[in-house]
């Protein structure tokens, strides 16, 4: 569904993403791993329009995303979470979930009910009227995922969903991801938690200094000497 | 749905209060009250609430808000005096001028924070200087324009109507989807855009709305005083006062600007009556104390400290 | 004839611009280190004008000799202002707006105090340099302007040295760039900010001393105008960039003076602001800045 060809992103003199191609088939999870600064977040930012790609084509179901505004891309059906959660701090949790669907034709009552149902699933319904800034970091990540779910996108970009999240919450997170996967969604998953990436994604991409150094399934990657070198040093 | 009921209750209380006040205020001229205080009370409530749409809901603080007020005053005066049209045509011209000017300035919204504020202020200064430099038969030059007739009662009712319209708009905005989008932009514009909000058009709506409120206010004030000149119509104090009144009550709340204006005007009046020599000094002191001890404004701080008040204040 | 006028305008613009630059520079030190919008900055410039007037009438000494005194006195005033207001403001929700209003209040108070002590009429410093003007080619330059420029440049040089060569200056610049990081590194941001505030107010008042030499007359009401010029200049130069502010000031000063030659008086005042808008449209982060658009 998503087809990235020769994507390049340069900041001043620094090549953050160096001519990378990959594709994400329907209903799949692509794992994106690499050491800090290898360009993972930058790839996501290019896909959802925060950055303009310097070169390359990003095709999503036949539309080229390069040059489109972030809101247009979101409306085409791509949602994302951020490495550092970014909620609307002075909006209540329910309101935070409503923001992506403000132009929806459904009624307010209907949408509020949907938002509250989502909050109930992850046990945040009691504090639905609290401002987002009153949440812990892990809870914020969770609400961010719920916000993506409100938009109901077909492709979801997750940037470090598990970092700094308590194992119990991680489990909730994993459940939600698997449920969405069963419902036919696709993901790009960035994480330093290799165990969960290996178990979740069918296909992995390993980045180093903006370049793709390996690609394949978990077993291939784990035994690839280039990857071992990049991750463990020589 | 408890929170929907809550919204419904406090909105009805507020609207009821508004209706009663409107009735009372509407009767004032008939009973021969001196209108000066009341006219300016309505005027400042309107301006503070109009500014609140940008500053409180959307997160852009336009120091140069007076530009719209001034252009409205001039548009009305030019239409009436130079082209001999009736005053209602002047109001239409003022509204149009507000729309046009706000569209011209729309691009400044790519700037954030203090950058935006200063640039907006610079634009207001430019407007004043350009209008003062125009030939006398176009915009009255540096002496301004005298309308040649005045109708304080008419202007008072027009101001009352505009204030009610503004407050109703803000009340609607506070619970509408547009308002929620604006508040999301205020908290984090980039994230708002990545979750699917077209921040350009959404904040443009707020901007134009806010501008038209100010330009209509300017036109009505011109009618009230029957005189317009660049020094008063583009006086930066108009912006600063509107900001102070809105902040004193609580930016981003519906009744904050109303409460803030009422309280600050009363304080101002008391200071003038009792300490004429020290008045400016004391006004400064009041502002400082207010910011030190109630930084979110009167209503804002109350809501923060006593969440149960959210049932009636918003 | 026209060229003489033009050169004259360039020279005056340069001198005024350097002084505007100093106002902006001190303003940006405050805004940069603590995100505080000091809307009362201009009042301290005006206070500097009156301070040198008092100094001169009381002692009869050369006005420039007042600068060290003014500097120290207003440094202390600035420190006091800092401890009175800023820590509290920084704890709030939106320090930028809150500080703008607080210091607007301070500006009203300071203006009222000036008005109370010095009345509304304009004053002037009756100090005459000998010779009172120099003639270079066809251009006349008042000695007062040359002295003001020289002193202004000296202050700028000292400030640049302070910011780029001393450990405190480096800490200050670091704080402008990243307030949070510097706390981790172990600099006491509170003391540093207080010093910065004192320094900025002291520079503003000293600039006032120089302006009193350049402008024949001053009154208690011009504070707001200087504040505005200061803000325009720093946005022009790029927020949080002290040297950029000085260059912004010079651009502003020259534009203003050259415009006076070519345009009717009322329009010439607009030119500085129009340049600001043009600059911002072309380079939203200011001439030298990096941050503006998030
Ligand atoms: N806005 C930017 N301006 C300049 N350089 C940038 C910018 N964003 C990212 N970079 C650079 O691009 C490179 C890749 O950054 P990116 O954030 O994509 O890394 P990452 O793989 O997500 O790392 P991490 O695991 O630490 O999150 C880094 O060297 C970073 O310094
Ligand atoms: Mg990253």
Image (tube, grey):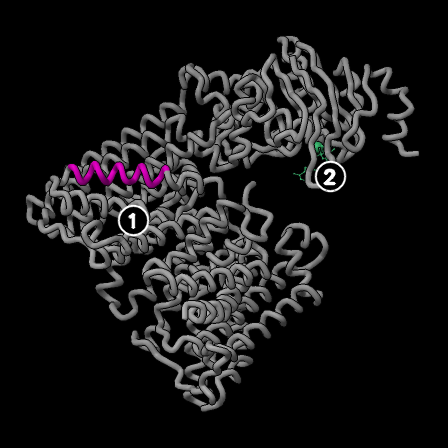
| Number of other residues with Cα within 10 Å of mark 1, as a class: few under 14, some 14 to 19, many 20 or more | many
Task: Please name the residue shown 40% across and 52% down the image.
Answer: B122
Residue A64, quarter of the rendered image: top right
In depth, the one of C94 and B81 nearer the eye is: B81
Q: Position of residue C80 (x, y in %)?
A: 52, 68
Which residue does the numbered mark 1 point to in the structure image? B261
Q: Which mark is residue A62?
A: none
| Number of other residues with Cα within 10 Å of mark 2, as a class: few under 14, some 14 to 19, many 20 or more | few
Task: Please name the residue shown 65% across and 50% down the image.
Answer: C180
Q: Secondary structure at mark 1?
A: helix
Mark 2 beta carbon near ligand 1 (under 8 Å): yes
- Same chain, marks 1 and 2? no
Q: Quadrant of ligand 2?
A: top right
C281 with respect to B278 (left or right): right
Tell me if I can see residue A227 in this picture: yes
Q: Position of residue A131 (x, y in %)?
A: 50, 34
Which residue does the numbered mark 2 point to in the structure image? A14
């Amino acid at each position: 569904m998503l087809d990235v060809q020769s994507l390049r992103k340069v900041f001043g003199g620094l090549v953050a993403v160096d001519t990378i191609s990959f594709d994400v088939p329907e209903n799949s999870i692509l794992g994106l791993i690499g050491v800090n600064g290898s360009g993972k977040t930058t790839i996501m930012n290019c896909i959802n329009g925060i950055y303009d790609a310097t070169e390359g084509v990003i095709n999503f179901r036949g539309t080229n995303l390069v040059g489109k505004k972030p809101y247009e891309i979101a409306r085409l059906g791509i949602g994302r979470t951020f490495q550092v959660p970014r909620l609307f701090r002075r909006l209540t949790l329910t309101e935070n979930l409503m923001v992506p669907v403000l132009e929806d034709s459904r009624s307010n009552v209907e949408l509020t009910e949907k938002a509250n149902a989502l909050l109930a699933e992850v046990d945040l319904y009691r504090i639905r009227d609290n401002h987002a800034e009153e949440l812990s970091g892990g809870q914020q990540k969770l609400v961010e995922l719920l916000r993506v779910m409100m938009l109901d996108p077909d492709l979801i970009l997750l940037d470090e969903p598990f970092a700094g999240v308590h194992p119990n919450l991680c489990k909730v997170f994993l459940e939600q991801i698997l449920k969405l996967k069963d419902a036919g969604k696709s993901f790009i998953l960035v994480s330093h938690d290799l165990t969960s990436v290996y178990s979740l994604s069918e296909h992995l991409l390993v980045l180093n200094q903006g370049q793709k150094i390996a690609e394949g399934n978990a077993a291939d990657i784990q035994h690839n000497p280039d990857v071992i070198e990049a991750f463990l040093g020589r | 749905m408890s929170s929907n009921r809550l919204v419904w209750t406090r909105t009805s209380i507020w609207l009821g209060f508004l209706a009663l006040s409107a009735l009372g205020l509407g009767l004032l001229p008939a009973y021969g009250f001196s209108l000066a205080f009341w006219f300016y009370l309505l005027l400042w409530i309107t301006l503070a609430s109009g500014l609140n749409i940008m500053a409180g809901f959307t997160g852009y603080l336009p120091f140069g808000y007076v530009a719209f007020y001034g252009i409205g005053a001039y548009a009305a005066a030019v239409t009436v005096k130079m082209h001999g049209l009736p005053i209602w045509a002047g109001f239409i011209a003022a509204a149009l001028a507000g729309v046009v000017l706000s569209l011209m300035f729309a691009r400044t919204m790519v700037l954030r924070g203090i950058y935006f504020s200063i640039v907006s202020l610079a634009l207001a200064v430019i407007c004043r200087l350009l209008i003062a430099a125009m030939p006398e038969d176009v915009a009255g030059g540096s002496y301004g324009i005298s309308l040649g007739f005045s109708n304080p009662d008419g202007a008072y009712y027009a101001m009352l109507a505009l204030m009610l319209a503004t407050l109703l708009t803000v009340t609607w905005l506070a619970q509408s989807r547009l308002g929620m989008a604006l508040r999301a932009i205020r908290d984090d514009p980039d994230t708002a855009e990545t979750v699917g909000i077209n921040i350009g058009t959404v904040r443009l709506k707020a901007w134009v709305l806010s501008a038209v409120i100010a330009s209509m206010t300017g036109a009505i004030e011109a009618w009230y005083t029957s005189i317009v000149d660049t020094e008063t119509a583009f006086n930066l104090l108009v912006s600063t006062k509107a900001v102070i009144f809105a902040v004193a009550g609580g930016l981003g709340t519906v009744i904050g600007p109303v409460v803030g204006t009422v309280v600050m005007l009363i304080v101002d009046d008391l200071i003038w009556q009792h300490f004429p020599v020290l008045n400016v000094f004391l006004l400064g002191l009041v502002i400082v104390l207010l910011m030190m001890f109630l930084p979110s404004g009167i209503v804002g701080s109350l809501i923060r400290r006593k969440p149960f008040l959210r049932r009636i204040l918003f | 004839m026209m060229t003489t006028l033009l050169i004259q305008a360039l020279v005056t613009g340069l001198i005024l611009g350097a002084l505007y630059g100093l106002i902006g520079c001190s303003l940006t030190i405050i805004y940069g280190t603590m995100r505080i919008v000091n809307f009362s900055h201009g009042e301290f410039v005006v206070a500097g004008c009156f301070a040198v007037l008092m100094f001169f009438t009381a002692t009869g000494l050369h006005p420039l000799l007042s600068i060290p005194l003014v500097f120290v006195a207003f440094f202390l005033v600035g420190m006091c202002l800092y401890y009175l207001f800023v820590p509290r403001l920084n704890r709030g929700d939106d320090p930028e707006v809150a500080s703008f209003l607080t210091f607007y209040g301070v500006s009203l108070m300071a203006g009222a105090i000036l008005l109370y002590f010095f009345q509304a009429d304009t004053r002037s410093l009756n100090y005459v340099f000998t010779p009172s003007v120099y003639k270079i080619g066809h251009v006349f330059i008042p000695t007062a302007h040359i002295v003001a420029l020289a002193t202004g440049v000296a202050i700028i040089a000292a400030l640049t040295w302070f910011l780029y060569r001393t450990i405190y200056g480096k800490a200050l610049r670091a704080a402008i760039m990243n307030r949070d990081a510097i706390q981790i590194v172990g600099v006491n941001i509170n003391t540093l900010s207080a010093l910065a505030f004192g320094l900025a107010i002291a520079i503003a008042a000293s600039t006032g001393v120089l302006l009193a030499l350049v402008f024949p007359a001053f009154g208690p009401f011009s504070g707001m105008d200087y504040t505005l010029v200061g803000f325009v200049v720093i946005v022009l130069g790029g927020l949080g960039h002290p040297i950029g502010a000085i260059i912004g000031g010079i651009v502003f000063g020259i534009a203003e003076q050259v415009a006076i030659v070519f345009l009717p008086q009322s329009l010439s005042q607009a030119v500085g602001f129009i340049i600001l808008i043009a600059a911002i449209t072309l380079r939203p982060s200011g001439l030298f800045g990096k941050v503006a658009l998030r």
